[in-house]
């Protein structure tokens, strides 16, 4: 064996054992043939693409698995949810502070970089509706700028709410991780419905009579209200999941579970991070139910060897 | 959610319309059909082959060992042939309309 096939075989470690046994030799042969035709070694881009696909197969993130299909369904609605979340934070968080006589803007027309980030998400969604094939890149841009915005806001002596940033960033994950084989259609109406439902739920869930509509996002914590009302939302989410699952719309049910992930996790993680807050037991129950659901999706998406096809193996010539 | 066919998928199916082919032959066929514009990476190819096999558009039809290397061959199924024919007709129709319009405004002789 020459050193090159050995190197190609090393790439197969990224794949699950069953896949490696089924397709490994075929992939190595293709890599070798491609390498011989171009340069006398396997190109770096070929190595990266084979390794990345191996990770996808290992994690069950391919387009034929439940996880992959659910991510595909959740991808654009996730970005739209992020845009509506941004819009909600702007209307219910940043603008009331700007118009308040107790606070005044320190960063351009707004308090921090928050509104600029919301704008990135809103523009990102408009671009995705026009060119859905670029959803992965657009999600990457939205997520990167949000993380960079956090750093920038800290430099401007602000204290961005890390939980809301975490929610925003994670809403781009389905687009980033979804398999990318076909062009996904825009699905404007379902996606906007998801966004509007998010906006309405947030509005009603966080609007308290003590502090009506006053809920700053990137200035101080408003996540308290989200965590406090999360059990009501969880009941709705679990009911939605159950209905979709029982009516055999399991990819959509799984997508709903994926999109509810950041809210359910933050509902528990946020109070846990503060000593003076108690974690709501119902939020913990919802988190456990969510974890079980996700485990089910991930487990059923693991690679399984295909039944042997009726193919014949003929040896044309034996290699050296 | 409705899907539409991406260019690399179309090129893979068009390559297989010629007959059964193995992995590297498909990469070559795609490069040739696209006049070098599409350089299919091995990882992308196998993601596509897995998906198309799962969808019943192509099927693995045999293996052979050439120079000590395993070649697995793929070909279009009847479903794949229909799909490719429909997609090709759709593309031809759109192209014809575009060309007619270009002629109308004097863009193409």
Image (cartoon, coloured by chain):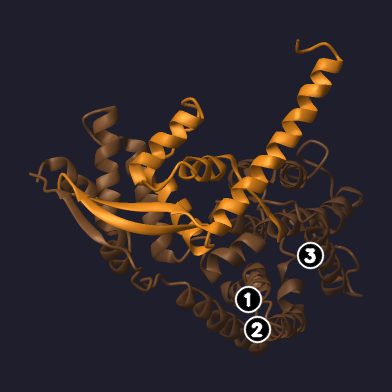
Chain colours: A brown, B orange
Q: Are marks 2 and 1 in contact (CB under 8 Å)?
A: yes
Indicate the chain on which mark 1 is placed: A
Residue located at (83% from left, 38% from top): A109
Q: Secondary structure at mark 1?
A: helix
Indicate the chain on which mark 2 is placed: A
Of pointers 2 and 1, the one earlier in the residue sequence = 1
Q: In the picture, residue A235 is in which quadrant? A: bottom right
Residue A145: image location, x then y, percent: 62, 43
Q: Is residue A52 above or below residue A224?
A: above
The disc at residue A194 is 3
The disc at residue A271 is 1
Tell me how far mark 1 sits from mark 3, CA to CA. Answer: 26 Å
Label 2 neighbourhood size at 10 Å, few (<14), some (14-19), many (20+)? many
Q: Are marks 2 and 3 in contact (CB under 8 Å)?
A: no
Of pointers 2 and 3, the one earlier in the residue sequence = 3
The disc at residue A283 is 2
Left or right of A292? Residue A14 is left
Task: Give the mark count.
Answer: 3
Q: Is residue B45 above or below residue A63?
A: above
Q: Do the residues at discs 2 and 1 belong to one chain? A: yes
Left or right of B102? Residue A277 is left
Report whether residue A157 is seen: no
Left or right of A147? Residue A44 is left
Q: Secondary structure at mark 3?
A: helix
Residue A16: image location, x then y, percent: 32, 66
Tell me how far mark 2 sits from mark 1, CA to CA. Answer: 10 Å
Q: In the picture, residue B108 is in which quadrant? A: top right
């Amino acid at each position: 064996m020459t050193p090159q096939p050995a190197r190609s075989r090393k790439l197969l470690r990224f794949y699950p054992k069953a896949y490696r046994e089924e397709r490994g030799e075929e992939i190595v042969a293709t890599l070798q043939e491609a390498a011989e035709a171009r340069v006398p070694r396997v190109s770096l881009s070929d190595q990266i693409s084979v390794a990345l696909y191996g990770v996808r197969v290992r994690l069950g993130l391919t387009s034929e698995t439940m996880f992959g299909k659910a991510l595909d369904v959740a991808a654009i609605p996730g970005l739209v949810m992020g845009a509506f979340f941004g819009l909600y934070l702007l209307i219910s968080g940043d603008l009331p502070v700007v118009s308040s006589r107790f606070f005044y803007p320190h960063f351009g027309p707004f308090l921090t970089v928050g509104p600029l980030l919301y704008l990135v998400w809103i523009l990102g969604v408009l671009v995705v509706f026009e060119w859905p094939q670029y959803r992965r890149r657009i999600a990457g841009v939205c997520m990167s700028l949000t993380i960079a915005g956090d750093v920038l806001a800290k430099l401007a002596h602000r204290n961005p709410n890390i939980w809301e940033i975490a929610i925003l960033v994670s809403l781009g994950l389905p687009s980033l991780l979804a398999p990318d084989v076909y062009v996904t259609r825009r699905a404007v109406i379902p996606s906007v419905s998801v966004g509007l439902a998010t906006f309405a739920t947030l509005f009603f869930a966080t609007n308290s009579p003590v502090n009506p509509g006053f809920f700053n996002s990137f200035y101080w914590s408003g996540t308290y209200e989200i965590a406090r009302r999360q059990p009501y939302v969880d009941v709705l989410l679990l009911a939605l999941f159950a209905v979709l699952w029982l009516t055999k719309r399991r990819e959509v049910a799984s997508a709903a579970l994926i999109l509810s992930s950041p809210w359910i996790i933050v509902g528990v993680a946020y109070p846990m991070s503060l000593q003076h807050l108690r974690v709501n037991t119902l939020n913990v129950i919802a988190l456990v139910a969510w974890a079980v659901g996700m485990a089910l999706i991930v487990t059923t998406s693991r690679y399984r060897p295909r039944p042997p096809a009726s193919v014949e193996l003929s040896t044309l010539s034996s290699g050296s | 959610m409705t899907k539409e066919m991406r260019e690399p998928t179309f090129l893979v199916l068009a390559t297989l319309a010629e007959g059964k082919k193995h992995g590297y032959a498909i990469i070559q066929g795609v490069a040739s059909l696209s006049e070098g514009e599409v350089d299919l990476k091995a990882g992308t190819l196998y993601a596509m082959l897995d998906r198309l096999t799962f969808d019943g558009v192509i099927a693995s039809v045999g293996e052979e060992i050439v120079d000590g290397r395993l070649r697995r061959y793929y070909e279009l199924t009847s479903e794949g042939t229909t799909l490719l024919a429909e997609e090709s007709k759709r593309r031809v129709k759109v192209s014809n309309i575009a060309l007619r319009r270009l002629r109308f405004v004097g863009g193409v002789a």
